[in-house]
Structures are given as C-alpha cells and as structure tokens.
Image: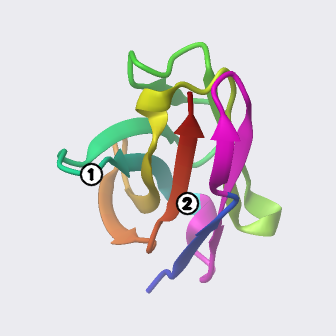
Amino acid sequence: QVQLVESGGGLVQAGGSLRLSCAASGRTFSLLTVGWFRQAPGKEREFVASIGWSGEVTNYAVSVKGRFTISRDNAKNTAYLLMNSLKSEDTALYYCAVGRGWPGRYEYWGQGTQVTVSS
C-alpha cells in the first residue's frame, strides 16, 4: 500500500512557475514509476509526465515538454514537478500516481493539488 499527498499548487500568473511535490508513504516508492496527470474542468484526465524508479528515464506530454521537469528524491520518498512558463491552459487539478514497470501501470493515486494560471 502506498499513500500519496500532493502539494505546491496555487494561483500563479501566466509565465510564472510552480513546483509540485508528491510525498509517498511506504518502503516501495523507490522501486516504482511516478506519473503526474492533470484534469481540467469538463475535460478528461491527461498524462503530463513520468519518471522511472531510478530517475534516469523520463517522459513528457508534448504540451509540456520543454516547460515542465519531473524529478524524484528516493531518499525523501518524494517526486516533484517543476512547471515553468505556465499558460492558462495548464490550469487543472494535478495528480501524482505510482505504479510498477515502464510505462507505469499506475495503482495508487493522490487526491490532487489545484493549479490555476491567470492570464
């Protein structure tokens, strides 16, 4: 069992930055793939970025590539999503998830943290 808690969301102006954190409980975090997803009002949940267990392999959605950076600190059981050059279309509820394999088969999800970008 893994529990995930996201934090770091908030209101930011277009062009600004935020760093989201995903804190995990459980001893298996370092073996799991971490993914970030988002869901805007009236839209389906979409993939944002993922990172393999060692941090060496990453993957990004086209819409965020070059602006967002995913990372992890296994010693702290925490993953991060650094979001730069934010746009109004990045406004969404952001979730982290963990799972086995690559790409991840996500089994555990957090409750989400809201990101609102004002134009």
The answer to whether 117 is drawn above or below residue 9 in the figure is above
User: Which amino acid, mark 2?
Assistant: Leu
Give neighbour class at mark 1: few <14, some 14-19, many 20+ (Cα, 10 Å). few
Q: At 55% from the left edge and 50% from the top edge, which residue is drawn?
A: 115
Query: In the displayed structure, does residue 51 sit left or right of residue 70?
Result: left
Give the quadrant of residue 57: top right
Q: Is residue 76 magenta?
A: no
Secondary structure state at the residue bearing disc 2: helix
Query: In the displayed structure, does residue 4 sit left or right of residue 24?
Result: left
For residue 31, the mark is 2
From the top left corner, tell me how far across and down residue 117 is, in percent: 56, 38
Mark with earlier residue (1, 2):
2
In the displayed orientation, state which residue is furthest to the front. Answer: 119
Measure the C-alpha gap from mark 1 to mark 2: 33 Å
Kindly tell me whether residue 71 is visible in this rendering.
no
Write down the region rendered in magenta: 9-30
For label 1, the residue is: 41
Kindly tell me whether residue 94 is visible in this rendering.
yes
From the top left corner, tell me how far across and down residue 24 is, in percent: 62, 74
Give the quadrant of residue 103: top left
Give neighbour class at mark 2: few <14, some 14-19, many 20+ (Cα, 10 Å). some
Q: Number of labelled discs?
A: 2
From the top left corner, tell me how far across and down residue 39 is, in percent: 31, 50
From the top left corner, tell me how far across and down residue 97 is, in percent: 43, 61
Q: At 81% from the left edge and 64% from the top edge, which residue is drawn?
A: 75
